[in-house]
Image (tube, rainbow, N blue to C red):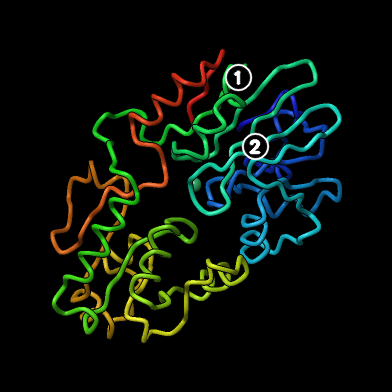
Amino acid sequence: MVFSTIAQSYFDEFPFRRRARRKPSSGYFFLSHAHSDHTSGLKSSLTDPDATIVCSKETEAVIRVLYGIPQEKCLVIKPNQSLDFDKFIVHALDANHCLGSIIYVIESKEGLKEVYTGDFRLGSPILDELSLIKGANHLWVDYTYGKDPIFQFPSREVLISQIISLILQDENYPERDVWISAYQIGKELLLKTISEALKIKIWALDQKVRVYKEIGGEWDIFTNDTDSGVFVGSRRMVEGLYGIKKQNQAKMSDALRISPTGWSARLRKKRLDVHFFPYSDHCSYSEVHKFIELVTAERITKI
Ligand SMILES: [Zn+2]
């Protein structure tokens, strides 16, 4: 549970159902992005008419489709925007994680500073605004791959071109289906580049299609049409052939299956018929340690 003492409220937690350890007094809840491990209790915020969810416009669209959160419940903040909340100031930075993810920097009028990264990947959107983050009194940092130096990842751009080459060099493409694993939200840069390179929309489950249609513009890249030839599904589905109708299993096991995941560096039982790439929307081991060193925070909480 991450509680901002400056803003007197929570990051990525909406503890309305159970008794909160600390009562929020500001009424503002800060949502970094819409991955399910960051939206605990989100729907219960509807029970409090005074609760306002601060998030990006993309996250607002996602939680509207997935959780039925009405637009007027959200206060939208853009990357590189600052909002003055009277007792404190909130700055948002592009977290370079999934679409619409943001890092929060909260400053008190007395000059105290808290930084909450949510999930992030170190890159130019963050490095360009380092002066804003530096010298935080308290830093909560996404430490997903921070414990083991085995987690070193090439840039996402390098891996995207490797993945596209793999598809285009497959002698059976486009007759052979392509399956790529991804969560409900995320890996957008990879999927959008594939969609553009192959000049197709990517098949996805209905809810994912609706989410990205709602975000709209250049991100409307998914379809319900199975003629697409390129499919996105969960890792369980793509790697383990779970959740597939029996009659489709043979076709699926015959497909070109691609799993882009940071965990691939340490998977013990790697399936030989799945192509793994260490593609990650989180920092590598070195990136997170570099970030911690650059921020020079007084107190650090690894999450
Ligand atoms: Zn995430």
Q: Viewed as shown, does residue 24 lie left or right of 151?
A: right
What residue is shown at x 38% (from left), y 63% (from top)? 234
Label 1: which secondary element: loop
Which one is earlier in the sequence, the residue at label 1 or at label 2? 2
**How far across and how far down the image is residue 1, in percent?**
60, 33
Residue pointed to by mark 2 = 11
Say what amino acid the circle numbered 1 marks.
Ala
- Residue shown at the point (35%, 73%) measured from the top left: 231
Asked if disc 2 is less than 8 Å from ligand 1, the answer is: no
Residue 183: x %, y % from top left: 43, 58
Residue at the disc numbered 1: 136
Give the quadrant of residue 225: bottom left
The residue sitting at 13% across, 59% down in the picture is 272
Please determine whether, in this image, residue 25 is positioned above or below residue 296.
Answer: below
Q: Is residue 74 left or right of residue 1?
A: right
**Viewer-nearest of discs 1 and 2:** 1
Gap in angstroms between the C-alphas marked 1 and 2: 16 Å
- Point out the residue furthest to the top here: 298
Relative to 134, does residue 222 appear above or below in the rendering?
Answer: below
Q: Quadrant of residue 24?
A: top right
With 96 as the anchor, is 202 left or right in this view?
Answer: left
Label 1, residues with CA under 10 Å away: few <14, some 14-19, many ≥20: many
Residue drawn at point x = 62 percent, y = 16 percent: 137
The amino acid type of the residue labelled 2 equals: Phe
Question: Please, what secondary structure does the residue beneath circle 2 have?
Answer: strand
